[in-house]
Image (cartoon, rainbow, N blue to C red):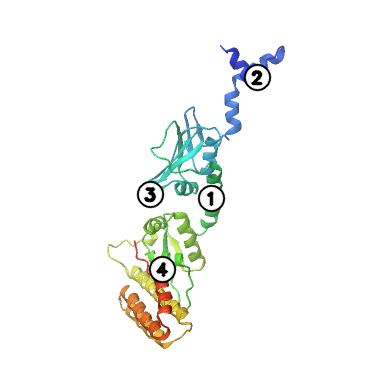
């Protein structure tokens, strides 16, 4: 039985033939309103207390928007393989998010670029802490921007579980890379995936992917699946050892370039001799110590020829180039 108050709330009083039509419309109003606000996408199930579906059917930012406009409180659970992320809403506003070691805004942005997986929203769930204070508008706009940018990155980076591998290059060619690119180069080992490298470097997968995209575009790296990149043998193969040599030789080239910048001249015998010696030692199997010896010898040469100020500038550059592996 309908109460007078509900009749007054949903529709004005009517009489005659329109009254019966109004009553029928009133009875189906909740379902019709839901259809207008939430597109009934194939594979997405809407329930009274929760809804769930596939991220492939609807981007994560759109999924969040659908629930946030209703002002609900609850928790999104997003699952992709072994990964599980959470986004909490209170009265429609995002207040907390978590994905692995990421929390807050960065977790929202990381989840926003997911293109596969499942989601479920459970009403009434609240977090133990609050890590987000930005309004939904800012978060969703940034999420949408990153999602659009990821569509471009994904043309060369199929997924975060793919492994970046350095490409062979002519050592005589100059190497001009930014500090973030060099930091990524010295971490690439041909074994760890993009996501694993991101965690090791303490950054987000999205930012690492942007840096890696530049290396791939320049022909310095390529992406391989884990099955293709990782050797099946238990011991290192010559290909893996070759990758390590390439990294160290590229570092030697960078040391020489920064030294020439500090000296204000190029092709100086004082710099060329230790550089060639370091390359030969690396080719014979010596490791990163060959690079460190090159840096020490180069510092002495700069100090002798240009003085302490130039040495300090060179050392500042080397602190970026020789960041330790995690």
User: In the image, which disc is placed on residue 320?
Assistant: 4
Disc 1: which residue = 147
First-in-chain label (2 vs 4): 2
Disc 3: which residue = 101
Q: Is residue 152 left or right of residue 254?
A: right
Q: Is residue 209 left or right of residue 227?
A: right
**Given this view, does label 2 or label 1 mark the residue nearer the observer?**
2
How far apart are the alpha carbons under marks 3 and 1?
21 Å
Callout 4: SS: helix
All told, the count of numbered labels is 4
Is 278 above or below relative to 27? below
First-in-chain label (2 vs 1): 2
How far apart are the alpha carbons under marks 4 and 3?
25 Å
**Given this view, does label 4 or label 3 mark the residue nearer the observer?**
4
First-in-chain label (4 vs 1): 1
Residue drawn 35% across the image and 81% down it: 297
First-in-chain label (4 vs 3): 3
Is 308 above or below relative to 221? below
Question: Image quadrant for the C terminus?
Answer: bottom left
How far apart are the alpha carbons under marks 3 and 2?
51 Å
Callout 2: SS: loop
How far apart are the alpha carbons under marks 2 and 1?
42 Å
How far apart are the alpha carbons under marks 4 and 1?
30 Å
Residue drawn 56% across the image and 43% down it: 137
Disc 2: which residue = 11
Badge 1: few (under 14), some or many (20 or more) residues near its Cα, within 10 Å? many
First-in-chain label (3 vs 1): 3
Callout 3: SS: loop
Question: Image quadrant for the N terminus?
Answer: top right
């Amino acid at each position: 039985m309908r109460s007078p108050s509900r009749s007054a709330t949903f529709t004005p009083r009517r009489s005659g033939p329109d009254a019966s039509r109004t009553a029928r419309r009133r009875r189906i109003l909740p379902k019709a309103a839901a259809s207008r606000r939430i597109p009934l996408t194939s594979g997405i199930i809407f329930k009274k207390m929760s809804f769930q579906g596939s991220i492939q059917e609807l981007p994560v930012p759109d999924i969040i928007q659908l629930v946030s406009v209703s002002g609900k409180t609850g928790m999104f659970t997003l699952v992709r393989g072994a990964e599980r992320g959470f986004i909490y809403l209170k009265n429609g506003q995002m207040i907390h998010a978590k994905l692995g070691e990421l929390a807050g805004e960065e977790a929202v942005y990381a989840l926003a670029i997911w293109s596969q997986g499942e989601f479920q929203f459970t009403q009434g769930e609240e977090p133990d802490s609050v890590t987000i204070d930005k309004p939904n508008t800012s978060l969703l706009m940034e999420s949408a921007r990153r999602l659009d940018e990821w569509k471009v990155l994904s043309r060369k980076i199929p997924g975060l579980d793919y492994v970046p591998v350095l490409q062979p290059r002519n050592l005589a060619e100059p190497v001009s890379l930014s500090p973030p690119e060099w930091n990524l180069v010295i971490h690439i080992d041909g074994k760890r995936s993009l996501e694993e490298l991101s965690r090791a470097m303490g950054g987000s997968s999205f930012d690492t992917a942007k840096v890696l995209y530049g290396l791939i575009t320049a022909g310095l790296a390529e992406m391989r699946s884990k099955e293709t990149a990782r050797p099946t043998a238990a011991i290192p193969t010559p290909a893996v050892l070759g990758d390590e040599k390439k990294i160290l030789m590229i570092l030697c080239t960078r040391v020489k370039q920064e030294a020439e910048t500090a000296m204000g001249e190029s092709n100086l015998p004082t710099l060329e001799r230790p550089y060639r010696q370091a390359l030969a030692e690396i080719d014979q199997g010596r490791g990163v110590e060959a690079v460190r010896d090159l840096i020490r010898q180069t510092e002495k040469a700069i100090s002798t020829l240009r003085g302490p100020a130039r040495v300090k500038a060179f050392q500042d550059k080397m602190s970026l180039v020789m960041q330790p592996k995690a």
